[in-house]
Image (spheres, rainbow, N blue to C red):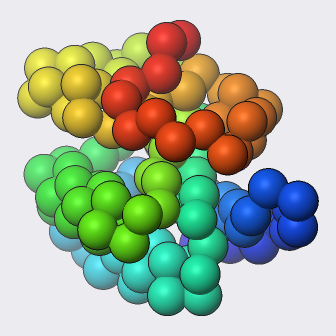
C-alpha cells in the first residue's frame, strides 16, 4: 500500500493513501490501519485515492465507513477519489456517495483542503 504525507503548513495536514486495485477482506485491515495512523498523526484531511481500484467488497466499504466516522469524530475529513464507473456505482447503490465526499481526481480532492464541508462533492 502506498502512503504519502505531503505537508501544507498553511492549510493543515493532508495524507494520500493509495490502496491496491482490489480491496477486499484480505487487505481491508492494512488499509484501516493506514487511515487510523494518518488520523492519529493529526492529519486533518485523509484522501483515499481509489482511482486505480477495480474491485471492492463489503469489507472495504465497512472499512471506509469506519474511517469516515473516525475522521468526523476527530474533526477531520475523509475524501475518496473514485474514477472507475463500476466502483462509483457501488457507492451510489449503497448510498455512501451521500455520506462520503467523492472526487473524480486526486487534484480535485487535494484542492481546498481547508473545506469544512462533509457532504458529497460534485464530480
* Rendering coords of residue 23 (x, y %): 35, 57
Q: Is residue 90 visible?
A: no
Front-lying residue, 88 or 53: 88
Left or right placement of residue 19 versus residue 36 in this view = right
In the rendered image, the vertical position of residue 114 relative to residue 103, given as above or below? below
**Residue 21 image offset from top left, x and y in percent:** 50, 50
Closer-to-camera residue (41/58) = 41
- x, y percent for residue 78: 45, 52
Task: In the rendered view, tell whether residue 3 sits above or below residue 122.
Answer: below
In this rendering, the count of numbered labels is 0
As drawn, is 3 to the left or to the right of 8? left
Q: Residue at x 70, y 27 (%)?
A: 108
Q: Is residue 93 above or below residue 54?
A: above
Q: Residue at 59% of width from left, 22% of height from top? A: 104
On the question of residue 62 being in view, the answer is: yes
Residue 6 position in % (x across, y down): 84, 66
Quadrant of the rendered image containing residue 42: bottom right
Q: Residue at x 68, y 72 (%)?
A: 3
Please state if 21 lies on the left or on the right of 111 as rendered.
left
Quadrant that contains the N terminus: bottom right
> Is residue 92 left or right of 108 when viewed as pictured?
left
Residue drawn at x 42%, y 63% as measured from the top left: 75
Amino acid at each position: 500500500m502506498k502512503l504519502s504525507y505531503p505537508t501544507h503548513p498553511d492549510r493543515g495536514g493532508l495524507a494520500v493513501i493509495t490502496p491496491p486495485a482490489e480491496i477486499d477482506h484480505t487487505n481491508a485491515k492494512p488499509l484501516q490501519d493506514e487511515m487510523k495512523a494518518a488520523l492519529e498523526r493529526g492529519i486533518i484531511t485523509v484522501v483515499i485515492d481509489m482511482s486505480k481500484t477495480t474491485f471492492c467488497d463489503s469489507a472495504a466499504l465497512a472499512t471506509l465507513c469506519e474511517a469516515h466516522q473516525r475522521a468526523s469524530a476527530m474533526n477531520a475529513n475523509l475524501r475518496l477519489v473514485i474514477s472507475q464507473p463500476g466502483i462509483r456505482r457501488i457507492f451510489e447503490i449503497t448510498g455512501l456517495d451521500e455520506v462520503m465526499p467523492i472526487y473524480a481526481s486526486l487534484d480535485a480532492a487535494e484542492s481546498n483542503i481547508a473545506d469544512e464541508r462533509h457532504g458529497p462533492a460534485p464530480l
